[in-house]
Image: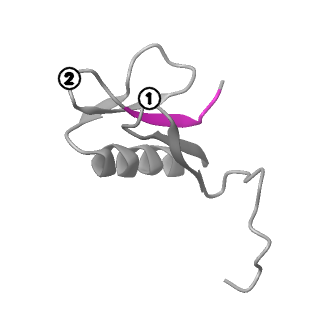
Amino acid sequence: MSKNRTVYRRSDGTWANKRNDADRASSVHDTQKDATDTAKDMLRKQGGGEVTVQGTDKGQFRKKDTVPPGHDPCPPKDKEH
């Protein structure tokens, strides 16, 4: 079972937060920020994972964030920050 989540824009203009292995969205929001914040909050409570955010430009992925304590497959090389 995957805990990872995707935030995407629905055809009605709202933003959905959906677990990747689910059939339906876990929550629907008016803004991308609200959907992303809710997805990150849910992942924190479930032990971490990845949030992938789709942009409005033809569904291309805009960003991908690891929510601790999830495993980041590509950690930053900069150890200073």
Quadrant where the image shows the C terminus: bottom right
User: Residue 78, position in %: x, y?
Assistant: 76, 78
Number of the front mark, 2 or 1 = 2
Q: Is residue 57 above or below residue 38?
A: above
Neighbor class of circle 1 (other Cα within 10 Å; few <14, some 14-19, many 20+) is many
Residue beneath the point at 57% across and 20% down: 21
Q: Residue at x 33, y 43 (%)?
A: 35
Residue at the bottom extreme, as displayed: 80
Instruction: Say left or right for 70 vs 34.
Output: right
Of the numbered discs in the image, which one, if any, rests on residue 12?
A: 2
Label annotation for residue 18: 1
| Residue at image location 20% in from the left, 23% down from the top | 12
Q: Amino acid at mark 1?
A: Lys
Percent position (x, y) of residue 47? 61, 48
Q: Is residue 26 visible?
A: yes
Q: Is residue 46 visible?
A: no
Callout 2 amino acid: Asp
Q: Which quadrant: the N terminus?
A: top right
- In this rendering, position of residue 52 left or right of residue 80: left
Asked whether the beta carbons under mark 2 and mark 1 sit within 8 Å of each other, the answer is: no
Going from N to C along the chain, the mark reached first, 2 or 1, is 2
Q: Which residues are magenta?
A: 2-8
User: Between 63 and 60, which is closer to the camera in this rendering?
Assistant: 60
Membership of 73 in magenta stretch: no
Q: Residue 19: x percent and y percent?
A: 50, 29
Location of residue 15 by image quarter = top left
- Residue 8 appears left or right of 13: right
In the image, residue 64 sits, relative to residue 3, either above or below, namely below
